[in-house]
Image: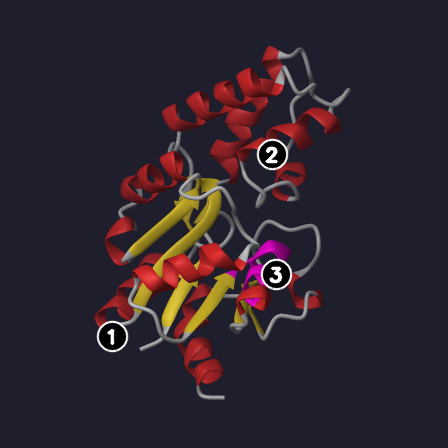
């Protein structure tokens, strides 16, 4: 049975509102202007550290190495306290995951969101129950697109054939490095349209994942 490995932010859950709140709390503490949702959506996907660094650079002078750790701590504290205030699964996600699980599919999450935030978010939204493996940044000292993290998730699910399902270039590069097919969702967080990235399949609707996965694995 194929293992389906999902990205989190921009693929399963629209986390932009709560990420934006935490990021703007950091910027306000530094006397910077707030960012808007459109700008944030082009920054997500590389982890919390990169998100803070990009936000600081977009609003003024880049953050210094000594200033970054306290700002990262502030971001994580604020985000943890408001982790699911406004975040919601994208349309069709809960129903599709339930159908896949009922069919015996092996499901995992692979995200560059810190592990300490990934689990609580999925629990709050009642999505954690669908996944046999949940891997966020911090479990290892390497993250996507390093293929080793992908293989760790697949191994935890029992090995065998697998697919990467995400929304960004990082997800595409992860799948290519791991030598597995890649499905991208077009509604996610990326400055480059998913249709232009060269994925094996691009979907506009999450409910299309089961049929797309079946088609790709039949090749």
Left/right of residue 5 with respect to residue 51 in the rendered view: left
Please, which residue is most extreme toward the right here?
61
Instruction: Name the spot of residue 67 as percent of width and height, x first.
Output: 63, 15
Asked if the residues shown at circle 2 and circle 1 are in contact, with their CB atoms under 8 angstroms apart, the answer is no
Q: SS for tag 2?
A: helix
Residue for badge 1 = 103
Asked if the residues shown at circle 3 and circle 1 are in contact, with their CB atoms under 8 angstroms apart, the answer is no
**Considering only order in the chain, which callout, 1 or 2, is on the residue closer to the N terminus?**
2
Residue for badge 2 = 51
State whether residue 39 is above or below residue 219: above
Magenta residues, as a range?
166-175
The main secondary structure of the magenta stretch is helix
At 45% across and 64% down in the image, what residue appears? 206
Q: SS for tag 1?
A: loop
Instruction: Name the spot of residue 148 as percent of width and height, x first.
Output: 48, 57
State whether residue 142 is above or below residue 161: above
Q: Which mark is residue 173?
A: 3
């Amino acid at each position: 049975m194929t293992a389906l490995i999902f990205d989190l932010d921009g693929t399963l859950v629209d986390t932009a509102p709560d990420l934006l709140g935490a990021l703007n709390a950091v910027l306000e503490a530094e006397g910077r202007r707030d960012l808007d949702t459109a700008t944030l959506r082009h920054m997500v996907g590389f982890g919390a550290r990169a998100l803070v660094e990009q936000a600081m650079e977009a609003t003024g002078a880049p953050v210094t190495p000594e200033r970054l750790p306290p700002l990262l701590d502030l971001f994580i504290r604020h985000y943890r306290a408001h982790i699911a205030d406004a975040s919601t699964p994208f349309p069709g996600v809960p129903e599709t995951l339930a159908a896949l699980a009922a069919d015996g599919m092996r499901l995992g999450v692979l995200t560059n969101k810190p592990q300490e935030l990934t689990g609580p978010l999925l629990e709050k939204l009642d999505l954690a129950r669908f996944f046999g493996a949940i891997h966020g940044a911090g479990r290892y000292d390497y993250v996507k697109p390093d293929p080793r993290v992908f293989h760790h998730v697949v191994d935890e699910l029992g090995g065998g054939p697998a697919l990467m399902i995400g929304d960004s270039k990082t997800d595409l590069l992860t799948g290519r490095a791991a030598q597995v097919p890649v499905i991208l969702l077009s509604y996610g967080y990326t400055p480059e349209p998913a249709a232009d990235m060269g994925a094996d399949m691009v979907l506009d609707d999450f409910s299309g994942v089961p049929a797309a996965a079946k088609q790709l694995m039949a090749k």
